Image: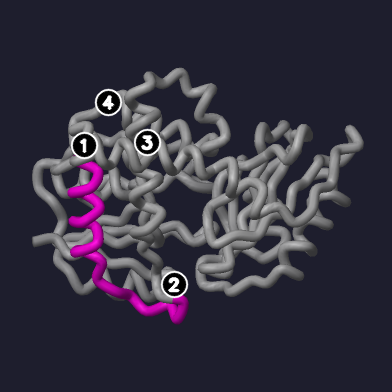
Amino acid sequence: MTVILISSKPMALQNAIDVFETSATVEAEYGDVLVLGTEEFPVLAHHGNNSHRPCPCTVDNVVSPPACIGLSHLDLDSLGGVLALLGRKPEAVSFWKLAAFVDINGPHKLGAAGAGALDVARLQAWWAWSETHRVFAPRDGSCVDITTQVEEAEGALCAILNNDPDLLEAGRVWAAREAQLEVESFVDGYLSNNVRPGVLLRVSEMFVNHLYTHGFESFDAVVALNTKTGSITLSYASPTFDQSACGVVQTFWGPLAGGHRGIAGSPRDMKCSLSDARELVEMVRKSGY
């Protein structure tokens, strides 16, 4: 049986997976630091320096699973990669294509994905389920076994892909609550002056970086403080050539911060405050990036 481990510290994860004869990693990326498994398995990483690689959730199932899989975080994309390494990823090409699109471009681009109504409903059902089943790496950097949690997530995902009516209904209810979340998470908004981007500051225990509008105004970027994890995420609705969320957060926090051009966050083991979020907002506004 494959053991699945998670850690917010790259060296802790590397040391833990090195004990096993065979190992693989999925998005074990910590800024520019990448933890790798044994060489017979594909590199499932696509942030920062690895952005040319495909999303883990789009890879094919392997024949022989590794003894251990290491992660830095668990979301739909990384879950798809884990299931592929286990040889158990469900056959749902259009759904995984949508999951990859949203992972790279952000949930706010869902309408531009060209996805069918059923796949959108399935994705919303997943978001609804995962909202109450979060899995986080310990803040102290220790490495823990999340095999059971991954199996639970696999069960929920398979039920959703089999069109479980209760889970799909929960997704519809979740989507309706998003409008309320927009209002409740709003803290401040700074409109664009055509030189510097407009930035929304949000605070919530939920993911809110897909909420780029407030009232009748649209903004270029969102800086969000997650009160549950203490993380800060910067995202751009449609990053221009000069904008890179990953570049901004690494300038602000250093190389252990990271992510994509369109969305990136604070170092995985850092506990941030509202004042940190306001400082990042000011950096984005003043720099123009």
Does the magenta stretch mainly form a helix, a strand or a loop?
helix
- Give the residue pinned by disc 3: 123
Comparing marks 3 and 1, which lies closer to the viewer? 1
Q: Nearer the viewer, mark 1 or mark 2?
A: 1
Label 1: element kind = loop
Placement of the N terminus among the 4 image quadrants: bottom left
Q: Quick check: is 145 in the magenta stretch?
A: yes
The range drawn in magenta is 139-158
Which residue is at the front of the view, 69 or 208?
A: 208
Q: Which mark is residue 55?
A: none
State whether residue 254 is above or below residue 239: below
Q: Amino acid at mark 1?
A: Asp
Who's the residue at 72% across and 59% down the image? 251
Earlier sequence position, callout 4 versus callout 1: 4
* Three-letter amino acid code at the position of disc 2: Lys
Residue assigned mark 4:
93
Q: Which mark is residue 164?
A: 1
Horizontal and vertical percent position of residue 56: 34, 42
Q: Earlier in the sequence, mark 3 or mark 1?
A: 3
First in residue order: circle 1 vs circle 2: 2
Spot occupied by residue 128 in the image (x, y as percentages of width and height): 38, 46
Give SS at disc 2: loop
Helix, strand or loop at disc 3? helix
